[in-house]
Amino acid sequence: MKKTLIWIGALVIGAVLGTLGVVWLDDVMNFVATVYTRLFQLLAVPTIVLAVITTFATFGSKGSGRIFGHTLTYTLLTTFAAAAVGAVLYVLVAPGNLPVETISNGTQPSDISTQTSYVDHIISVIPNNVVKPFFDGNVLSLLLLAFAIGIGLSKLPESENKAVVVKFLVGLQELLFLLIHWLIWTLPLGIVAFAAQLSAQVTAGVVADSIGKYVLVVIGGNVIQFFVVLPLFLLIRGLNPVHVLGRMMPAVLMALFTKSSAATLPVTMDTAERRLGIRKNISRFVLPICTTINMNGCAAFILVTSLFVMQNGGTVLTWDIILLWILVSVVSAVGNAGVPMGCYFLTLSLMSGIGAPVAILGIILPIYTIIDMVETAENVWSDSCVAALVDYDG
């Protein structure tokens, strides 16, 4: 509780500093925020790899298949629920089309990112050497490698050589968690910087009014999923959602400001084990997987944004189309990496593939910072719920 209050205090201080409009102060806050984001990204990759390898190597196939099955089931259920909530809300709110001149004056997404097909995105997951995924931060490729190494170690006959390798990996993991604890101890400074950065953007008029209904659907869907749907999953299994959220709040707040569930993973795992009491073999197996495939907020964003872009391109949105894109959004979200703006560029790729007016994504871009924060916090909250549910199932 004390740590949460300190973090909230840092949030308030940062928000105030961001509204002052002092250029040198904004530069300092941007610098500090960048440093913290890079440090968590640095720790995130080895955390994911070591967590999966040591879990499989230590526990082998005993229960791993069942745990993975429960994880995948809860992930798909919550992700489909998030997309469905977004679809219903979109139909109820019914955002209108943007003026043609607004679309034509928007920032062209081609100026923002090199467009690649979704097939290329899937192929890039298959590693062609051991080193490249580490340099690229390709989480899915790293998971494939980690699964292979971990399962291989679990299948090796017991020997001194196997014991040495496993002890070495476990020792590296313990060292990594020590570094994570040190970084978390200094985190209030980072929260001040993240909050100041966001506050400065809002003060400068980043939030656009012209697509208010679209934003209402995206943010509203995330809020409903966060406070209604996910707690219902916990309640159905007999878990107290207030207790779970209260214990996991440091990780949720961290996700809100880093806008990266992968970068937040070290905090999520530490918080789940130390505050919520989830068993280590569960948290270190389930959470790295969830960080990669459990993207509730991303699924809702892909669906709502795709419907909005297609509607502006002249597509008549029938329930057949909406149901199809619920499926597309879920599959796409599962294959998305937990990095800042991952959902944005994935949606851009999908819309480019069907010839939709992708210039609209350039208009959405200035407000995506806010959307990305909210959906990342929801993703980590969903990861926490899945881990708690799997731990409860035993």
Image (spheres, helix red, strand yellow):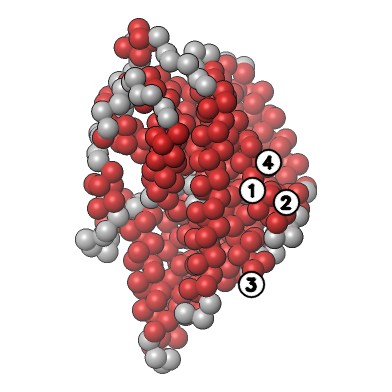
Q: Which mark is residue 230?
A: 1
> Residue shown at 58%/43% (left/top)?
378
Q: Residue furthest top?
A: 101
* For residue 96, above or below residue 131: above
First in residue order: circle 3 vs circle 2: 2
Residue 226 at x, y = what percent? Answer: 63, 42
Tell me the amino acid under the disc marked 2: Pro
Instruction: Tell me the distance, in whole angstroms, between the alpha carbons under discs 2 and 1.
Output: 8 Å
User: Which residue in the structure is indicated by mark 4?
Assistant: 227
Residue 54 picture location, percent across and down:
47, 73
Using a 10 Å C-alpha cutoff, classify the residue at mark 1 as few (fewer than 14 neighbours), some (14 to 19) or many (20 or more): many
At a point 48% along the width and 73% down the height, the residue shown is: 65
Q: Is residue 272 left or right of residue 133?
A: right
Q: Can you identify the residue that label 2 sits on?
A: 241
Q: CA distance from mark 4 to mark 2?
A: 9 Å
- Which corner quadrant holds the C terminus? bottom right
Label 2 close to label 1 by CB (< 8 Å): yes
Question: Would residue 303 be found to the left or right of residue 233 on screen?
Answer: left
Q: Which mark is residue 394?
A: 3
- Look at label 1 and name its amino acid: Leu
- Is 164 located above or below residue 75 in the figure? below
In the current view of this chain or complex, which residue is farthest to the left? 128
Could you say whether the residue bearing mark 2 is in a helix, strand or loop?
Answer: helix
Q: Is residue 182 visible?
A: no
Spatial CA distance of label 3 from label 1 is: 19 Å
Q: Are marks 3 and 1 in contact (CB under 8 Å)?
A: no
Where is residue 44 shown, x and y percent of the image? 46, 54
Quick one: SS at disc 4? helix
Q: Can residue 355 be seen?
A: yes
Which SS class for mark 3? loop
